[in-house]
Image (cartoon, grey):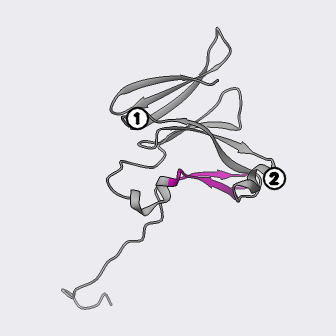
Amino acid sequence: AIGTIGARIEVTSVFDGWGYVHLFDSNLQELDTYAIPEAMDPLFARGYGDLSVHEVAVDPQEPTLAYLSYYSGGLRAIQIVSDAATCAAQGDTAPCLVEVGGFIDPLGNNFWGVETFVDEKTGGTIILASDRDSGLWIFRDP
């Protein structure tokens, strides 16, 4: 039975963060997750833009390095780290995801897409990030 038709119900929500990146092994066992601190803070649940990842691009020359288009959280770079001491220092077990870089404009960003390429002249990695408000941003991996 569905209950009394027309009866009042009470609905509440529970904030458990915005979306985050998951690291899986080849057996689909989840090994770790990554999210920026603001994405896990209920104080940022409203009024700060989207704090989730839209797209992930792996570095074409370093498969343990990935770039994230994080909407209002900017462009982020994360590394899959196998060193147990590094992972333990952030309260994790190996392997883990560690933020190794990022960019957010002082006026804000709204990154939607990210793609990586190898610069044929320099051999370095170029990161293209599309911002829904300000257009295309071009970065070089140092």
In the structure shown, which secondary structural element does the residue marked by tag 1 occupy? loop
Q: Residue at x 71, y 51 (%)?
A: 96
Say which amino acid is labelled 1: Pro
Q: Is residue 13 above or below residue 52?
A: below
Q: Residue at x 46, y 56 (%)?
A: 18
Q: Is residue 19 visible?
A: no
Q: Residue at x 66, y 18 (%)?
A: 124
Camera-nearest residue between 90 and 117: 90
Residue at numbered disc 2: 84
What is the spatial separation of the Cα atoms under label 2 and label 1, in whole angstroms?
35 Å
Residue 68, percent from left and from top: 54, 39
Q: Report the front residue among 38 and 9.
A: 38
Q: Residue at x 62, y 25 (%)?
A: 141
* In the image, residue 118 above or below residue 74: above
Left/right of residue 89 with respect to residue 36 in the rendered view = right
Circle 1 crowding by C-alpha within 10 Å: few under 14, some 14–19, many from 20:
few
Q: Picture coordinates of residue 132 (x, y %)?
A: 35, 33
Q: Quadrant of residue 66?
A: top right
Question: Which disc is residue 106 wearing?
Answer: 1
Q: Which residues are magenta?
A: 20-37
Q: Quadrant of the C terminus?
A: top right
